Amino acid sequence: AQRVTQPEKLLSVFKGAPVELKCNYSYSGSPELFWYVQYSRQRLQLLLRHISRESIKGFTADLNKGETSFHLKKPFAQEEDSAMYYCALYTGTASKLTFGTGTRLQVTL
Amino acid sequence: DTGVSQNPRHKITKRGQNVTFRCDPISEHNRLYWYRQTLGQGPEFLTYFQNEAQLEKSRLLSDRFSAERPKGSFSTLEIQRTEQGDSAMYLCASSSWTGGSYNEQFFGPGTRLTVL
């Protein structure tokens, strides 16, 4: 069965510091990985997906199949990045998203 | 149409009562998903519809839970004989599935259920 692990419940960084939110997955097939974000009082929304290989709001994530990881990175954290971040795995056969437990990113001055 | 909407936003009920939630997806989205999120956890898949057909149900969806999407538009999720363990945020999402790989799921604001 598929599984997504986010080891950190809370990550606190200073503004301007680099950010890395960790995500590991377990899936025997070919995965599609995503990062979803939930800002305060807003709904869950897609931040980025691995196959697009693009940078959104300065965030990037690279799928490492050898390490089964999909860590989210940003070189310089901003206050507006403070939010809840969820890593998610999509398995086409099941047509559903499997989410990790989430990491709260707190960016302080 | 400003996105997926869910009603009510909050529901407080007593144990043993039945509750029903409604989800209105983005117009013309053919897929509709229900997820449940408990405190400290990520959303967990419950079930999904393609048009009016319910194609998959999670083992989390006990016999007390039933979901419908009668005309392939809005959906309802009913919980019968609620238990305190049903207290959670119930999320609805919709997508326009055209086959092949993932099509982005757009989430609603959720319905927060509290069972006393």
Image (cartoon, rainbow, N blue to C red):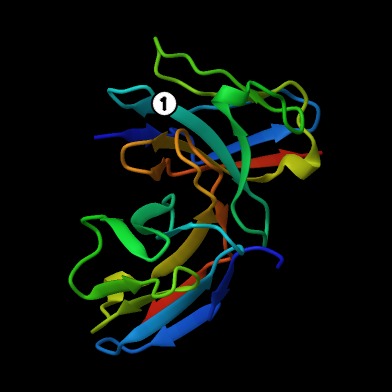
Image quadrant assignment for residue A42: bottom right
User: What residue lies at 54% left-to-right and 50% top-to-bottom?
Assistant: B96
In-front residue for pair B98/A95: B98
Q: Is A47 situated above or below A38?
A: above
Provide the chain ID for the residue under circle 1.
A
Q: Quadrant of the N terminus of chain A?
A: top left
Asked if residue B116 can be seen in this view, the reply is no
In this orientation, which residue lies closer to the viewer: B33 or B72?
B72
Give amino acid for label 1.
Answer: Asn
The image quadrant where one finds the C terminus of chain A is top right
User: In the rendering, at what x and y percent does residue B3 appear?
Assistant: 66, 63
Tell me where residue B56 appears, x and y as whole percent.
28, 54
Q: Residue at x 79, y 35 (%)?
A: A78
Pinpoint residue A81: horizontal percent, then vertical percent: 73, 40
Res. A72 image quadrant? top right
Q: Note whether residue B8 is visible.
A: yes
For this orientation, the residue located farthest to the top is A66
Question: Which of the pair A62/A19 is nearer the observer?
Answer: A62
In this figure, which residue is indicated by the disc labeled 1? A24
Residue at 37% in and 36% down:
A92
Residue B115: where, in percent of width, then height? Answer: 35, 81
SS class of the residue under badge 1?
strand
**What is the total number of numbered labels drawn onto the structure image?**
1
The residue at the point 49 percent across, 46 percent down is B97
Position of B73 relative to B81 (above/below):
above
Label 1 neighbour load within 10 Å: few <14, some 14-19, many 20+ = many
The quarter holding residue A68 reads top left
